[in-house]
Amino acid sequence: MGAGTHSRQETTDSDPLPAPLVFTDAQTATEAFRRIRAASEKLCEGLEIEDYGVQPMPDASPPKWHLAHTTWFFDTFLLKAWDDQWQPYHPLFEHLFNSYYNGVGEPFPRWRRGHLSRPTVSQVHEYRRHVDSRVCGLLDSAQGTPSWPDLVRLLELGLHHEQQHQELLLTDMKYNFGHNPLYPALTSTPQTAAVHEEGSGSQAADLGFDFYDPGLVEIGAGPGFCFDNELPRHRTFIGPYTLADRLITNGEYLAFIEDGGYQRVDLWLSEAWAELQSRSTHHPLYWRHQDGAWLEYGLNTGLQPLDLQVPVVHVSGYEAAAFAAWSQARLPTEFEWEFAAATLPIQGNFVEQGDYHPKSISGVGKQFFGDVWEWTSSSYGPYPGYRPLPGVLGEYNGKFMSSQWVLRGGSCATPTSHIRASYRNFFYPKDAWQFSGIRLAKDP
């Protein structure tokens, strides 16, 4: 069945997203589409069939659902809108694999995604192949038509959406395996961690602080792809500050624990202290204390002795803020972070390296990108003059601008091409299941 195109209203100068700079023709667009779609399935190569349907907590989703939902996104927002021969692949898929787009229809409840034994994994893969074929046909037939600019803008958004779910695939797999008493590794031949037992091994360089005196600066996305929450680029005043020249390590966080950091009410925000009292564990999410020693679960390594030299990861925003207070410092604002990172190259430990864990801080620069998402003290809200995307896609970011904190920089689970200095990730400050860590700031 061939793919046709529907003409669509031309975009206007007031649209939030800039025109894409990459997809100038169908071949370029198709190659990027196939490459990024294949990357999602490659991340699942270490899974057994039993793993695909597990939902380890309400905030996570089964791998099978991620593979289907990203397909639903292209099916709903590209094919349904532009393919004049479009028919629903299955009449209920729009309901089952809609995440939170109430303008499309009623989503299947998030906390029940793990209850769906059907469709099967093989049926989800068939759905992916069907949609992939239709999208590639659509791109080929739409090249050179008035619809092309709008189509590839949505394609690019969809690909970045898929890359977000690639990261979520890894975080959700890790939550499943990291809470299984067997502590299985994702790979059949786990990598051996370079382990530093407590009190041994080379020590990290002393934590230093770089001075910045920005004044009135521009913040927000520049040319190229961005999400609507990174716009508009605008001026803001940033006073003098200092920023740590590296991330906080496991060893430094362990010192916070051993000094009674989790028992000192003066270090914690009121809401954080209340949340802390409801928890049975007082340590980063994947640390375990066994036989007098600290261990840490890694997705590729299983449970291993704690490496004191790697950046601490899977701490909540509340934990990061308490550690900062204990250190007589603070978390940076997202604007301070962006100003410091804006001129740096996008390089670091990303998902392509296949480690899925932070690396030692030695010899790798200041680690602004990759390794861990860095908590900031900034509440996630709109920039001055912010306007969400038109229509249903306006639900993508804007409706979540409440009660969350901004994180910056990407992690070891982030695709390299997905990150930029202006990227604003956001989670609730109690959340620790993301690959999140700490960089300190101080006032001069």
Image: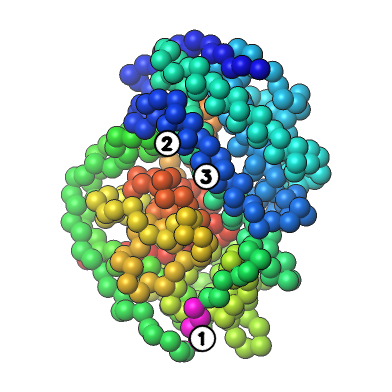
Percent of width and height locating residue 141: 50, 17
Res 286 seen here: no
Is the residue marked by circle 1 packed among few (<14), some (14-19), or many (20+) residues within 10 Å?
some
Q: Quadrant of residue 24?
A: top left
Which numbered dot is residue 227?
Answer: 2
- Disc 3 and disc 2 in contact, CB within 8 angstroms: no
Is the residue marked by circle 2 packed among few (<14), some (14-19), or many (20+) residues within 10 Å?
many
Res 48 seen here: yes
Which amino acid type is marked by label 2?
Phe
State the residue in front, 142 or 195: 142
Magenta span contains residue 376: no
Percent of width and height locating residue 299: 60, 65
Upstream in sequence: badge 3 or badge 2 = 3
At 54% from the left edge and 31% from the top edge, which residue is drawn?
395
At 75% from the left edge and 41% from the top edge, which residue is drawn?
122
> Can you say whether 224 is above or below 185 in the image?
above
Badge 3 marks a residue whose secondary structure is helix
Upstream in sequence: badge 2 or badge 1 = 1
